[in-house]
Amino acid sequence: MKSQTLATRCPAALLAFCLAAPQLLQARVEPSHGFDLFSAQEEVQAGQQAAAQVPKQLPVLPDSSPISQYVQRLGKQLAAHAPGEKWPYSFHVVNQKEINAFALPGGPVYVNLGTIQAADNEAELAGVIAHEISHVVQRHGTRSASKQMAAQLPLAILGGVMGRGALAQMASLGISFGANSYFLKNSRQSEKEADLLGADIMYDTGFDPHAMAQFFTKIQAQGGARSAQFFSDHPDPGNRVQYVSAEVRTLPAKSHYLGDSADFRQIKQEVSGMTPLTAQQIAAQQKQGGPASAEVSPGSDVSPSTRMQTLNHNDFQISYPENWQTFGDQTSSVTIAPQSGVSDNAVAFGVMISAYQPEDLSASLDQDTHELLASLRQSNPDLREIGSDETIRVNGAPGKSVDLIGNSPIQENGRPARERDWLVTTERRDGSLLYLVFIAPDKDFTALRPTFEQMLKSLRVK
């Protein structure tokens, strides 16, 4: 009776509440905030500088091609609904077979031709583009670079960089946002943020947000080399379908979503007959000085042969370039490297493979890996972890992947060059770790990474 009286006395208030109720159900993913040394202007400039180099690294289709123009129209349609800073978005297509896409800071977005070929409908392609737009909105690239800069710069210098001068300081540290840059490889948290924000962008544009999660799940289930690169750069945060569906449930229900457009059907037919380049073919062009040239120094034998041979160790089997050599025997730690990549017992290019006996054999792989990292840092105090360690699969078994940076034995201008180290660990039957450290100077690591990944895929632990 009391509630009836309240409703009778306050009809206007009750009506206002009823009108507002649907809005209470509508969740919106806001751009997250984190430590970032870059101003918006510097972010745009960094992305434009990197975009100018991409055609030299990757076979980008002309912006005037019908395929590129279609992706530009679809991208602009989605970007119109992106929240936060109004970045100068641009959209491009890379003539590459592997399913992948990436976004540079400040707006440039690139989609591989293989992604368009793999999409069964326009909503799936829109999901990939909305996901990449969300990485731009969330400023994931410059936030990742800022973390590394903070790790490398003394506090006195860092204080002067914050809020101004980050772009110039980035250049002095040799950091860049080129294609395949470490800073374009996202963490699982960044992937989840891009999924959720991308779902909202799709919904506001008129596409079914479920299509984004379903496409990622589909290509992961299919597996194979075409999708391996995507999940290397976009690690699966897990439960994609569930949390995207939960986000959609917070939005007002729609009875109808956009279907395939005539443009998509026409472009889909055109790309189905095309044969884009593989990552391996692009890498070969780089070595020949064509588009995407990236020279590896110092010796010509450093450039890995495309022909592989096999090392049968007592503890493992692995394939490696036939013009590289092995150092070690069947029972010891092994280094695989080009002859000129090793000098004075220091490895500048190659991979070291060894075993590590943790203190507690019942500890988790994650605990053992961090114990190993602590041990490695004792002899290499300048070694720093960049980004977050990732859980991966090594020939079907659980593994951990960690990117590190330190000093190389190679000298540049009288100072040690910066070195990238990629640590991969997996468990052996006795509870110890088998670990691999892939090594190259920072400026050469991108060119050698496809070879390192090929070697890791061939690894068989005995």
Image: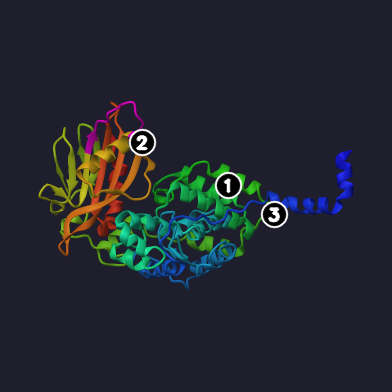
Q: Of the residues under marks 1 and 2, which one precedes in the sequence?
A: 1
Tell me the magenta residue range.
Answer: 354-367
Q: Indicate yes or no whether the magenta region holds residue 261.
A: no
Q: Indicate yes or no whether the magenta region holds residue 357.
A: yes
Q: Position of residue 191 (x, y in %)?
A: 48, 50
Instruction: Report which residue position mark 2 lands on.
Output: 366
Asked which colour scheme the image uses, the reply is: rainbow
Q: Residues within 10 Å of mark 1 (few under 14, many from 20)?
A: many
Q: Residues within 10 Å of mark 2 (few under 14, many from 20)?
A: some
Q: Quadrant of the N terminus?
A: top right
Q: Is residue 9 left or right of residue 320?
A: right
Vertical placement of 330 versus 418: above or below? above
For the point 45% across and 64% down, the residue is: 93
Depth check: give the residue in front, 206 or 361.
361
User: Which of pointers 1 and 3 indicates the residue nearer the eye?
Assistant: 1
Q: Do the CB atoms of the residues marked 1 and 2 lie less than 8 Å apart?
A: no
Q: Do the CB atoms of the residues marked 3 and 2 lie less than 8 Å apart?
A: no
Q: Quadrant of the C terminus?
A: top left
Instruction: Report which residue position mark 1 lands on.
Output: 244
Q: Is residue 44 left or right of residue 9?
A: left
Q: Position of residue 256 (x, y in %)?
A: 69, 54
For label 1, the SS is: helix
The mark found on residue 256 in the picture is 3
